[in-house]
Image: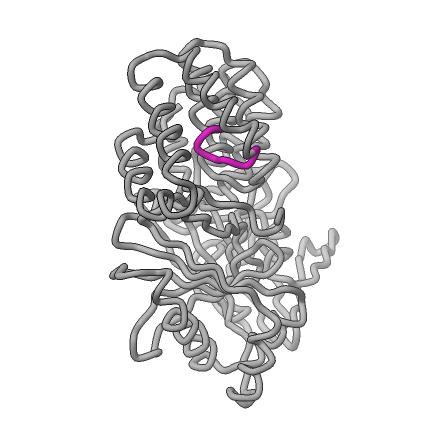
């Protein structure tokens, strides 16, 4: 298990909580947390577990106690107990990325292939770049023949932030990445139809109609033909098409990370033009703001000089309001919220901004003082661990579980 807990970093993290902890709880919590860390560091795993249990008896959502309890059980090779500890943590914070990753490792080590694969899907949904570590991790050797693991080993694809998995893996033809067409069109929100006689697939989204035929090196877009670098092919009953040209036909932008074999397809953001001041006033009452400072306990592996500002829609109406703004208006709104929460964010030099609805990130960018930040739009949303930081308690809590 390679992403479990970075002991040195976490020890520093506990130490920087000292002022708030002393003010809020007489330093008792900090003392007990550091004692637990020390027990683990000295190889006293049984005592570490007892310490974690005592802390959890007082606060069942204390993430550090869950993590060290699981790690201590792992060191004792009590994998069943380590799994139970991680499952307990995930009941409190279901999208906790390190817990999901290590649970996948343990499921693999104990031969629970289906559960391991399910946990890996969730890890990849949080960030497709997790494949980099997964591919190198020998803990997953037992599930090397699983279709989900094979997807991760090969070309990975995200469409509008959603990580796709295929029963027929992507391949390369004439230097072009070929993907199962239905999965791509479904993720793009296009309705598809298959004509077996002519072996033609047709997709419709809005006012755009796209048609491709097996073996033909042309694509028809709204009646106009364009040349393909690679013709669609049939593989194991699935139609594979060149992802770039097919996605671009619907106005999407495609990027390729060759080093890590990741294809990212991004669609155009909604074209809003609503009056900014009117929407801002309505949005303020329709969202919650969660500042997360990298100096304190958090699940994102932020550095000490980094922070996150989460703008969380209370319901779908808030998301629609945010969509109604122009590109510049959305960036302006997020940047204004950063400035309003500067006290909690502290002197962090980098602040990542996210607009979240129903546990998924739909807009993300980096703060700029001039408000001219550039936001990336994710039509399908990226799964997010949405938390509220508890600085006095050296902890963070799941927003949707509050």
Q: Is residue 249 left or right of residue 349?
A: right
Q: Residue furthest front?
A: 26
Q: How many marks?
A: 0
Residue 247 seen: no
Q: Is residue 101 left or right of residue 194?
A: left
Q: Quadrant of residue 210?
A: bottom right
Q: Note whether 199 is above or below 91 in the view shown.
A: below
User: What is the x, y in percent for residue 54?
Assistant: 51, 23
Residue at the image position 49 percent from the left and 10 percent from the top = 78
Q: Note whether 140 is above or below 335 in the view shown.
A: above
Q: Note whether 393 is above or below 361 in the view shown.
A: above
In the foreground, 129 or 35: 35
Residue at the image position 66 percent from the left and 65 percent from the top = 315
Residues drawn in magenta:
60-66
User: What is the x, y in percent for residue 228?
Assistant: 47, 61
Residue at the image position 48 percent from the left and 48 percent from the top = 157
Q: Quadrant of the N terminus?
A: top left
Q: Note whether 75 is above or below 120 in the view shown.
A: above
Q: Is residue 300 left or right of residue 358?
A: left
Q: Is residue 62 magenta?
A: yes
User: What is the x, y in percent for residue 334?
Assistant: 44, 72
The type of colouring in the image is one colour
Residue 75 seen: yes
Q: Is residue 361 left or right of residue 193?
A: left
User: What is the x, y in percent for residue 254?
Assistant: 43, 61
In the foreground, 381 or 206: 381
Q: Is residue 1 magenta?
A: no
Q: Quadrant of residue 221?
A: bottom right
In the foreground, 146 or 224: 146
């Amino acid at each position: 298990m390679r992403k479990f807990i970075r002991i040195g970093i976490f020890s520093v993290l506990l130490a920087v909580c000292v002022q708030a902890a002393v003010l809020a709880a007489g330093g008792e919590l900090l003392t007990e947390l550091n004692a637990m860390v020390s027990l683990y560091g000295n190889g006293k795993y049984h005592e570490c577990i007892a310490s974690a249990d005592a802390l959890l008896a007082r606060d069942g959502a204390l993430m550090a106690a869950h993590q060290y309890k699981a790690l201590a059980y792992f060191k004792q090779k009590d994998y069943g107990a380590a799994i139970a500890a991680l499952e307990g943590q995930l009941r409190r914070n279901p999208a906790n990325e390190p817990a999901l990753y290590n649970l996948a490792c343990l499921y693999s080590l104990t031969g629970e292939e289906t559960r391991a694969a399910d946990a890996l899907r969730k890890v990849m949904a949080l960030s497709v770049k997790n494949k980099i570590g997964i591919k190198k991790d020998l803990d997953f050797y037992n599930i090397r023949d699983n279709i989900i693991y094979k997807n991760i080993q090969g070309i990975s694809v995200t469409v509008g932030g959603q990580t796709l998995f295929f029963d027929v893996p992507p391949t390369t033809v004439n230097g072009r990445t070929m993907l199962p067409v239905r999965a791509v069109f479904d993720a793009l929100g296009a309705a598809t139809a298959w004509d077996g006689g002519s072996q033609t697939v047709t997709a419709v989204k809005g006012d755009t109609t796209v048609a491709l035929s097996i073996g033909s090196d042309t694509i028809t877009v709204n009646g106009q033909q364009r040349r393909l670098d690679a013709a669609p092919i049939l593989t194991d009953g699935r139609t594979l098409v060149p992802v770039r040209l097919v996605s671009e036909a619907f106005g999407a932008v495609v990027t390729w990370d060759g080093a890590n074999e990741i294809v990212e397809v991004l669609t155009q953001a909604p074209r809003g033009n609503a009056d900014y001041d009117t929407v801002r006033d309505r949005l303020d009452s329709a969202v919650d703001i969660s500042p997360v400072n990298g100096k304190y306990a958090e699940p994102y592996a932020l550095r000490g000089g980094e922070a996150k500002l989460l703008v969380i829609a209370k319901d779908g109406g808030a998301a629609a309001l945010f969509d109604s703004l122009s590109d510049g208006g959305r960036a302006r709104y997020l940047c204004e919220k950063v400035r309003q929460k500067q006290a909690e964010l502290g002197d962090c030099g980098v602040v990542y901004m996210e607009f979240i609805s129903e546990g998924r990130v739909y807009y993300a960018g980096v703060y700029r003082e001039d408000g001219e930040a550039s936001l990336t739009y994710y039509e399908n949303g990226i799964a997010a661990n949405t938390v509220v930081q508890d600085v006095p308690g050296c902890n963070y809590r799941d927003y949707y579980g509050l």
